[in-house]
Amino acid sequence: MNQLSDRINNLSTSATLAMAAKARELRAEGKDIIGLSLGEPDFNTPDFVKEAAIKAVNENYNSYTPVDGYVELKDAIITKFKRDNDLEYSRPQIVVSTGAKQSLFNIASVMLNPGDEVILPCPYWVSYSDIIKLNEGVPVEVKTDIKNDFKMTADQLKAAITPKTKMLWYSSPCNPSGSVYSKDELRALANVLQEHPNIYVVSDEIYEHINFIGGHHSMAQFDDMYHRTITVNGVSKAFAMTGWRIGYIGAPDWIGRACNKIQGQVTSGANCIAQRAVISALEADPVRIQYMVDEFKERRKLILGLLNDVDGFETNEPEGAFYVFPNVSAHFGKTIDGNTINNASDMAMFLLENANVATVTGEAFGNPNCIRISYAASQEQIIEAIKRIKAALS
Ligand code: PMP
Ligand code: GLU
């Protein structure tokens, strides 16, 4: 008998992590799988960050840290927010967590009552919806159009708001579409929210530095939105530190204190060595990580060029992050080598089994017509992967 809680029984498995695990399993069986499923930079953590961690170990940083993070780290985050985003925060407004994923979980826990609605422009990052549901909130998906670069318009936001709307969550640059909201587009959304002073915003900016068009804008930069925006960020992507598990928020202080409270009962705070290392990461001039951004830019050009040649893959031009999100619905209903492709999940499975390329179904991101391809892989792997996809589809 299933003795587990309804809460866990109703939770979906993270599709990104599940696909990565499946690819790992197939590789262990000897299959030559190219993994384009996980949003994980394939670079090493920069040496100067690693050195800071080694120094912290040798200096005996081994105790519990303050629940919301070392003061020196919070100060480095405050300086980073000022330097990169022109945002002013004080220490109680900053909370360091075990990855931005935990920051998002904390926010859902401290902000949502059962039945509160959270607007999610689709496609949204895979875990938003389940983090919200785990906290008894109700995700409200807003479909967007590839012709508008998968961005939600002010009218779409307006139409999605109900008396139960508590929050809006989005990422910019967006995982999975790579779209970047301009200042004017954010302002247009903020104008709608002016009429709804009780709606709070999560602005997930974890891909801030992986931006190919320049000009990163934060919702909290608008004076009238600052007091109700929670800015989420972290080091996983920009500093190739996914396994170090450090993320953080800048938020109104009452939200910061609430996140601190929940963390005090759940984790006691993030890992001490990782926190010391992140001080050096955030204090560094962002030019020190530009080589990774430049390489992602090259790969974006490469993969967009290659996908152009793949029949039935319609792709927008991502402006940031390291994903492409092609609409593959032109293939739905086709039978190839005995496999019928009825939806994006079938397509992802078909590509895994017939092309040995791991991608992720768009269904997990709220868009059943697309698949997500991560180009956080070498140029050789990208070339080979698209070659295999093309061959499998023809
Ligand atoms: N937000 C977005 C949009 C992401 O793609 C990710 C992926 N890692 C996260 C948050 C969580 O990042 P982490 O927990 O590694 O800091
Ligand atoms: N955020 C990455 C992704 O979307 C990492 C996986 C995860 O945290 O779910 O692939």
Image (cartoon, rainbow, N blue to C red):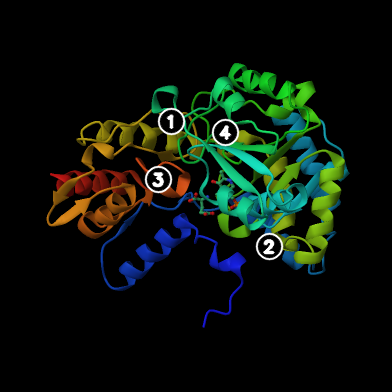
Q: Which residue is mark 2?
A: 54
Ranked by sequence position, the earlier of labels 2 and 4 is 2
Contact check, label 1 and label 2, Cβ < 8 Å: no
Q: Is residue 181 left or right of residue 136?
A: left
Tell me how far mark 2 sits from mark 3, CA to CA.
40 Å
Tell me how far mark 1 sits from mark 2, CA to CA.
37 Å
What's the amino acid at mark 3? Gly
Element type at marker 1? Answer: loop
Q: Residue at x 41, y 47 (%)?
A: 363
Report the mark closest to the observer, 2 or 4. 4
Q: Residue at x 32, y 32 (%)?
A: 304
What's the amino acid at mark 2? Ile
Q: Is residue 130 left or right of residue 299?
A: right
Tell me how far mark 4 sits from mark 1, CA to CA.
11 Å
Which quarter of the figure has residue 246?
Answer: bottom right
Ranked by sequence position, the earlier of labels 2 and 3 is 2
Percent from the top left, x then y, of residue 71?
Answer: 85, 50
- Classed neighbour count for the residue bearing mark 1: other residues with Cα under 10 Å, few (<14), some (14–19), many (≥20): many
Q: Residue at x 49, y 32 (%)?
A: 320
Quarter holding the C terminus? top left
Percent from the top left, x then y, of residue 222?
Answer: 74, 22
Element type at marker 4? Answer: loop
Q: Which residue is mark 3?
A: 362
Q: Is residue 86 left or right of residue 342?
A: right
What's the amino acid at mark 4? Ser
Tell me how far mark 4 sits from mark 3, CA to CA.
18 Å
